[in-house]
Image: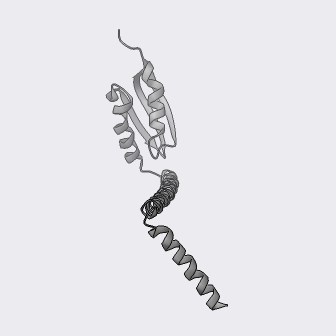
Amino acid sequence: MRNQANLMLGVLFGAGLMYLLDPDRGRRRRALVRDQAVHGGHEVEDIGDGVASKARHLRNRARGAMLEVKNRLARELETNDSVLEARVRSHLGRLVSDPTSVEVSAEHGRVTLRGAAPDQEMRGLIEGVQEVPGVHDVISRLRRQRSKG
């Protein structure tokens, strides 16, 4: 039985060699086999690139979720009031046109804003202060300042 299997393998191998080494059409047949092998290699690369891309995407999503949880836990920890006031003051320059007109005080994560701010900047100021890490609540004691002009 084993000898017959070896004989069949030898016949198939010889027929394949005759097919590829044929003097008339062998060159074309070898080129087709080579082209198909190259194409198959590219297909495997594309699959590999897709898998690598998905793996990178999942890794980034997992990292983002981990950092989000870490950030939420850090926000829940009590922040020193003076540090919180300094954080809010540093953001004021991006939130209002005249940050010196706004006074900031903080107590246990609750920030109180006093002073004056232009009408059109009031909403953005309060929303921006709420986004500062460590701020749990914002109390606005601001006066609306009419825009000049």
Q: Looking at the image, can residue 73 be seen?
A: no
Q: Residue furthest toward the right?
A: 1
Up the image or down, 19 lies above or below 117; here it is below
Find residue 3 and report its horizontal and vertical position in percent: 62, 91
Q: Residue furthest toward the front?
A: 24
Q: In this view, does 5 lie to the left or right of 146?
A: right
Find residue 138 and report its horizontal and vertical position in percent: 50, 36
Up the image or down, 3 lies above or below 84; here it is below
Question: Residue sitting at 46 percent across and 67 percent down?
Answer: 22
Q: Looking at the image, can residue 79 be seen?
A: yes
Find residue 9 and report its horizontal and vertical position in percent: 58, 81
Q: Nearer the viewer, residue 90 or 100?
A: 90
Up the image or down, 19 lies above or below 66; here it is below
What colour scheme does the image use? one colour
Q: Nearer the viewer, residue 39 or 64?
A: 39
Q: Which of 71 and 83 is in front in this view?
A: 71
Q: Quadrant of the C terminus?
A: top left
Question: Residue sitting at 67 percent across and 90 percent down?
Answer: 1
Question: Residue sitting at 40 percent across and 35 percent down?
Answer: 104
Find residue 33 and report its horizontal and vertical position in percent: 47, 62
Q: Which of 36 and 113 is in front in this view?
A: 36
